[in-house]
Amino acid sequence: MRILEQFDSEMLIAKRQTLGKKAPHQGGMVLLDGIIWVPNGAIKREKWLNGGSYGETHTCFVRGSPFFDGCVMYCVKQYKAHSQMIATTEHDREILASRVRHSRVVRATGVSIDSPLVALFPYWNGGSFQSFSLLIEKEKRNSFLSVGEIRQIEIFWKNFPLICSALWTTLEAVHNADILHCDLHIDNIFLHFEDDKVYVGLGDWGMAQTVEMAYFALGHKWCKKDTNQFGHIALELKAPKPIADQPYMKATNMYALGFVI
């Protein structure tokens, strides 16, 4: 496997200049393998959504582009995350795009050409399972909720069996393509509300492996924190021994999803 961390912004610019001659342009943007490479100056951040140790997310719009209609930008804060973002982008093209295309697989649609690195994703108005669970906790505590929030909670519970089924069939489609998510938890499952329906998606594929990659990583146990980024899961829980003592496998994804539900 190529050393993804060696990529930097200069190499990304060189890639754009080399391949841009073969790709459609729009306002300095380049479409390459299903991902749009966007100049940083075209990305305008709007509402802050959340932050973490590696970066933060905002809603945003992209000036002069017909490709983006409501999206979220993820902006990294440190070099480690910069390298991880590049790895995620490479994963997206080499693993996901070549093996599976599914409406519930949330893929990066754009990446900035210049540093600092920014990734652009479709906007899911219900946020993640994690953020939505906080809304449900507010309801339990009888905290003030807007009419829209109350309506979303009603729609969520009404459609909960369908949500579980959709997650399972999405994971099944990914497994049938011999891909392992490897980072399946409530922050990486997204909701989108439209009328009286709710849609669900699986995102954050930066740690995804093919089944072949998992076999080559036999020494990297999923429940340990000292493995490389391709050999562990972020779930802080104790799995049954038949799973915890094995390399990452399809059963691990299934266990993680069952735990989430």
Image (spheres, rainbow, N blue to C red):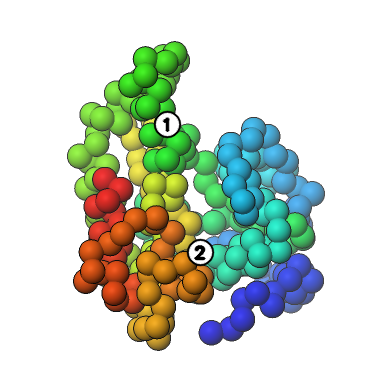
Q: Give the image location of residue 206, x and y in percent.
A: 51, 64
Mark 1 to mark 2: distance in Å? 25 Å
Q: Give the image location of residue 24, x and y in percent.
A: 66, 63
Q: Quadrant of the C terminus?
A: top left
Number of numbered discs: 2
Above/below status of 63 relative to 138: below
Which residue occupies the foreground of this view, 10 or 194? 10
Q: Give the image location of residue 8, x and y in percent.
A: 73, 71
Residue type at numbered disc 2: Gly
Q: Residue at x 49, y 71 (%)?
A: 226
- Specify whether residue 100 is in view: no
Q: Residue at x 64, y 35 (%)?
A: 48
Query: For the residue carrying disc 2, how many other residues have a C-alpha within 10 Å: few (<14), some (14-19), or many (20+)?
Result: many
Q: Residue at x 43, y 50 (%)?
A: 188
| Residue receiving disc 2 | 206
Q: Residue at x 37, y 15 (%)?
A: 142
The image's mark for residue 190 is: none
Quadrant position of residue 249: bottom left
| 203 sits left or right of 47 in the view | left
Element class at badge 2: loop
Quadrant position of residue 18: bottom right
Say which label, 1 or 2, has the lower sequence index: 1
Element class at badge 1: helix
Above/below status of 115 relative to 139: below
| 259 sits left or right of 24 in the view | left
Residue type at numbered disc 1: Leu
Quadrant position of residue 153: top left
The image's mark for residue 134 is: 1
Query: For the residue carrying disc 1, how many other residues have a C-alpha within 10 Å: few (<14), some (14-19), or many (20+)?
Result: few
For the residues bearing labels 1 and 2, Cβ distance under 8 angstroms: no
